[in-house]
Amino acid sequence: MSKVSSPIPVAILGATGSVGQRFISLLNNHPWFKVAALAASDRSVGQRYADAVRWVLDVPMPESAKNMAIVPASTDAALAKVVFSALHTEIANELEPAFARAGAAVCSNASSYRRGEDVPLLLPEINAEHIQLVKQQRVSKGWSGCIVTNPNCTSTGLTIALKALDNEFGVKKVFATSLQALSGAGYPGVSSLDIMDNIIPNVANGGEEEKVEWEPRKMLGKFAGDKIELADMVFSIHANRVAVIDGHTVCASVQLERPVEPAVAIQALRDYAAPPSARELPSAPRPVIEVREEADRPQPRLDRMAGKGMTTVVGRVRRDPIFDLKFVVLSHNTIRGAAGASIYNAELLVQEGLV
Amino acid sequence: MSKVSSPIPVAILGATGSVGQRFISLLNNHPWFKVAALAASDRSVGQRYADAVRWVLDVPMPESAKNMAIVPASTDAALAKVVFSALHTEIANELEPAFARAGAAVCSNASSYRRGEDVPLLLPEINAEHIQLVKQQRVSKGWSGCIVTNPNCTSTGLTIALKALDNEFGVKKVFATSLQALSGAGYPGVSSLDIMDNIIPNVANGGEEEKVEWEPRKMLGKFAGDKIELADMVFSIHANRVAVIDGHTVCASVQLERPVEPAVAIQALRDYAAPPSARELPSAPRPVIEVREEADRPQPRLDRMAGKGMTTVVGRVRRDPIFDLKFVVLSHNTIRGAAGASIYNAELLVQEGLV
Amino acid sequence: MSKVSSPIPVAILGATGSVGQRFISLLNNHPWFKVAALAASDRSVGQRYADAVRWVLDVPMPESAKNMAIVPASTDAALAKVVFSALHTEIANELEPAFARAGAAVCSNASSYRRGEDVPLLLPEINAEHIQLVKQQRVSKGWSGCIVTNPNCTSTGLTIALKALDNEFGVKKVFATSLQALSGAGYPGVSSLDIMDNIIPNVANGGEEEKVEWEPRKMLGKFAGDKIELADMVFSIHANRVAVIDGHTVCASVQLERPVEPAVAIQALRDYAAPPSARELPSAPRPVIEVREEADRPQPRLDRMAGKGMTTVVGRVRRDPIFDLKFVVLSHNTIRGAAGASIYNAELLVQEGLV
Amino acid sequence: MSKVSSPIPVAILGATGSVGQRFISLLNNHPWFKVAALAASDRSVGQRYADAVRWVLDVPMPESAKNMAIVPASTDAALAKVVFSALHTEIANELEPAFARAGAAVCSNASSYRRGEDVPLLLPEINAEHIQLVKQQRVSKGWSGCIVTNPNCTSTGLTIALKALDNEFGVKKVFATSLQALSGAGYPGVSSLDIMDNIIPNVANGGEEEKVEWEPRKMLGKFAGDKIELADMVFSIHANRVAVIDGHTVCASVQLERPVEPAVAIQALRDYAAPPSARELPSAPRPVIEVREEADRPQPRLDRMAGKGMTTVVGRVRRDPIFDLKFVVLSHNTIRGAAGASIYNAELLVQEGLV
């Protein structure tokens, strides 16, 4: 990309956690970004990254990260232009605005500011134009940096599939049940005694359902120059934790304004293309949506790495006896649904000249 | 029970399969029934049961079964008054009517005759009066025996919970997503390579969803003297297989005729009592429905054995943003949903003087 | 048992942990003991047990425990004659002697005092006579109570099988590899992300192997009036954690002083009987050892509940190409290997008039 | 590699099975070989590969394979110079010699001919010179082709680690316990009901143990011009199946002729290099052996893909209380232990001018 002549230094906040590890893994050999700082809690500061972390990914730790010394998450330490936040909500509440004030473009995976009126909640392949909200944010907050957020990992795949349908047929109501992977709970996260030979019919004590009932409405909403008008849709979500390592599956039933046959919906899902500004970015999913026609797909173990973990996989598109369509959506929760999401957002910021 | 002065001899068809094993386990020391014949495929005939079977239950094989010689599934071999069928559909199609003609009360777990107009589809705690259809069946078929069926294991728990709500508030529409256990697929059933670190978003190639969209309507329907009028409800089902050994979980959203607060619904679920004729039978669930108020229950591993595996466990009863109520139902699929179901049905037949 | 005219009050220290839960479950309706106090950490003191605990067993919490108020683990609170300790090592180090000094018979599952010269390390079915060491202990420590310990859960089944062989043929050397269940690590214990689609080839950072290389030597040692002479055997142990909920499996190769055919060894295992004083106790395993002859048993899910979880199950007894015999041992790690072990020890204390 | 000017056509026998799938996956874009024929059972012949197969790998099916028509496994169909056999033993017994007679170099994963006196049992990084046995084989059998075998997947990693130790210190006796992955049993292979919350303490009804007690002796044996002299070592093996998808773990205790400290052994393992002829081949592991020093590694999920699944990973090298050293070995059972093994063997054949 001609935009980026020399690597942009980036920092990762919460670098030792499981999402932090994905950031490091995905940023290894990134064409635009270079990891300049790994920040973690006081307990780890000063240690070699390789000594401080319990690495849980099944891809090896990049050599370049091993010997980096962990720094505190303080803004003066950050010469980074882009800051990736894998912080817990309470800490993100405080630190993210501080970094934005100090001039960094904060690309956050935390839920703290997703509902902020001037904060983009962004999936570039569906609502790239919402990024313009950053200008509004800079004015209202007086920041030279900014905060841009990506949605909850369960909202992610569902919203992308809905976007393709909403564009063509109008989405009105959505029932959806999630079967969520363990990595979504972080590390150590879910005890093995709670999930072996078991499922847990709740996530985050109900909080997950609330998020997924609201977040898609913002992302599918209209950008009206200086704010987002929430989409006029209703969601009912049932969230479950299942014994899967990576990959969130969502079973959805959808009511449309202009009902169509499943074959037509499949074509619309396949034909869906990202907005031009989001298409050629390094992390752009290729394709945005893959539709499988086998009777028993998508499956997390077999399909989560589609498009390097950035593609949304849809299957079992069929008629719904109450609404119009039923289908299944799969999305990699720590790539498309977390670290990959923030990186893709950062790429869009760079592309739009906002970094 | 004064009804039964000496043990009633029963036969099990398909005795070596996983449901057959549950029949043997549950009938061990049954107060009314005594296992007189174990029938299985030609390959096993003549062998000791203990030699022919690959026992997969985590309770030991009853001593009394070990030395029984396996017999062919032929009607002349059956002096049994009650025949429990754990046969595959295609074989059940042929054999069950033959046994009924020969005078046996066939209590079937197969799906072959569930839709028969004169065949009861029975869960005694909710529609015990449907058993009277047997009289109609005997007249129309000219049988001295009969066929009585129990529903699909996924229909079972859902329908019991819906009955309690329908009685009080009227059920109109139901969205439900199942997370079904592996034992529902029999043995060897699901390959470990298909389910480790995975889910399969379909069961029986779509057939499961069709069953669960229809069967509750018959069971919740009205017995009109000589036939069942299907309940006027619509169901939309998503079926999934998950890495759980026993216990089907169902997430349901329900629209009611007379909407109520969750607390009122919980009370109705707790207060639900079986019809008098079904209350005191040996296999009657005690209680019919257990409601848990923790945020993360029911869970299959912790709750499937409630009421010796016959109780339906409901949790997370809460408002639904589109319909009226959301909740989670758990039922033991090979006890309440299969072998225990057929045995409970047989007990009702005996009690009603139909054996 | 005529010995016990009225129930003996007992206390459980560490009552909210996973072993503490097993104590409560196994002591429910115990013929001799009555739970008088449930002690846990300060955080829980004063709460109802049902509110303070996260119950992880697949058997329901006894009604009698639900409303008990949790007390601190202080000796004045304990009117209990028998104290069951499910404490962590560091806390057990301090508290167990305090209770013994205060007059309680402490039956401990902790490793703190297993190596104490005057502390019995006890499996009643193999070394009941070691309990006499308590008299020595009382003299040397000036305690009216005492401390009696049970071994590590992995030592347990292995040592019982070895005892039967050692009696008849003399055991000299033992190679053994464990495949240990998750419940052995307590709750929350092992993260699901560490064990799904995985094994961990170490337990307690090597500490488990050290214990299992030493503990059997004490238990198989000779009681020489006032001390134990360690058995003259050598052990080499490899410990692994696997994705099993309950039940430790151990693969063992054994060198004997008087080599025998597998059939003879099987007979010796089957014929093994507990010392008379340990045979009729309420928790005595019946049988002590069960030998399975199938090619693929024992298996944790199918065999761990043999003899209500107190029986040691052995299988695949065959020749070893280097030593003399190879076999597989299975033992329920939280019943025979933890809570059940301490209770069985307490029963022996009562029987011997030491409580 | 200058040796290969144009792609060598190869055939895969048993192309639809799980090992067949690995062959297809690993041969995609291979620098020397081009898949010319996919053979499978009569049932599949004529179908598109994508329609006939149930793909179970978590990497996608290569595009080039999807539309290939499946052919019968007959020698006239094979213009292939190299034939990879993923056949079951009984079929391999017959078909492999037929292909060798017809001129093909058969690189077999089956166990049929591993014990043949003139058949190389080959792991190029340890016994590349054994390939010269092919000349002997051609003379004695009158074949223009040949049969070359790779060992059992459990023998593989263990033998490679032992080679490095044997070279330096002499290996005399080996106790080893395997924890084997599910993919080793093929598809559908192990039923989920047999392995969830369970282990199976046996593989192939004892046959696995026999193989691993013999195969390493041939591979570590000396090539004496026209035959292999078996290494003078004794093995005692315990084989177990565990709930892991890919990656066999082996816990080993080893007696040496010249005992050494663990640190010296670690250095020897790290320094081990393949024979020169096997070093630069496309599938050569880089490195041959990786030694991890963490207390809890190797682990199958984290380490099986080391060196693209061709590297043997060793950890926990420590003193053994009975023998000299204890350690843990991990090897990817369907890559280094099956398909990758046959391909590496074929590369050596090409390199040595034997194809």
Image (cartoon, coloured by chain):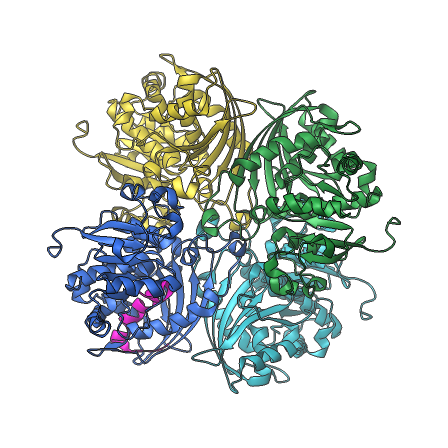
Chain colours: A green, B yellow, C blue, D cyan
Location of residue C313 in the rendering, given as x and y in whole percent from the top left corner: 32, 61
Magenta span has D79? no
Question: Horizontal placement of C193 versus C127: left or right?
Answer: right
In the picture shown, does residue B208 fall above or below A12?
above
Location of residue A27 in the rendering, given as x and y in whole percent from the top left corner: 73, 54
Residue B269, visible in the rendered structure: yes
Quadrant in the rendering for residue B322: top right
Location of residue A23 in the rendering, given as x and y in whole percent from the top left corner: 69, 52
Question: Horizontal placement of B319 versus B17: left or right?
Answer: right
Residue nearest the viewer, comparing B177 with C266 = B177
Q: What is the magenta range?
A: C150-173
Location of residue C301 in the rendering, given as x and y in whole percent from the top left corner: 39, 53
Residue A314, visible in the rendered structure: no
Q: Main secondary structure of the magenta part?
A: helix
Quadrant in the rendering for residue B275: top left
Q: Residue furthest top?
A: B225
Residue nearest the viewer, comparing A46 with B290 = A46
Question: Horizontal placement of D7 versus D326: left or right?
Answer: right
